[in-house]
Image (cartoon, grey):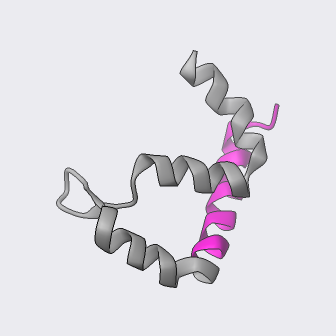
Amino acid sequence: MIPFEKLKLDLRDKWLDYYEVNRLWIKILMESSAVKTPANGLRPSSEFILGAIGGIEPELLEWINPFLQ
């Protein structure tokens, strides 16, 4: 299993690359299905977040399963 700290760094870089390439449609998605944050900001739905990061970082699945159990 990949160390969690390395996973966080890798995922951050991969997410930024993913967002840069896909930001046009992500912004459109956010207009229709954004979720408010406690600080009055907006974020994508949790389903979108899990789907996107699961696709760009398959090793994340090793960490998700223990949390779901």
In the shown orientation, is residue 26 left or right of residue 41?
Answer: right
Q: 26 or 12, which is in the foreground?
A: 26
Query: Looking at the picture, how far across and down is residue 56, in whole percent?
Result: 71, 58
Query: Looking at the picture, how far across and down is residue 21, in whole percent?
Result: 64, 82
Where on the picture, by quarter, is residue 44?
bottom left
In the shown orientation, is residue 49 left or right of residue 52?
Answer: left
Position of the N terminus by quadrant: top right
Asked whether residue 3 is drawn in magenta, I would say yes
Q: 4 or 61, which is in the foreground?
A: 61
* 15 vs 26: above or below: above
Position of the C terminus by quadrant: top right
Judged by its main secondary structure, the magenta piece is helix
Residue at the image position 50 percent from the left and 79 percent from the top: 25
Residue at the image position 66 percent from the left and 74 percent from the top: 17
Where on the picture, by quarter, is residue 36?
bottom left
Asked whether residue 47 is drawn in magenta, I would say no
**Magenta span covers which residues?**
1-19
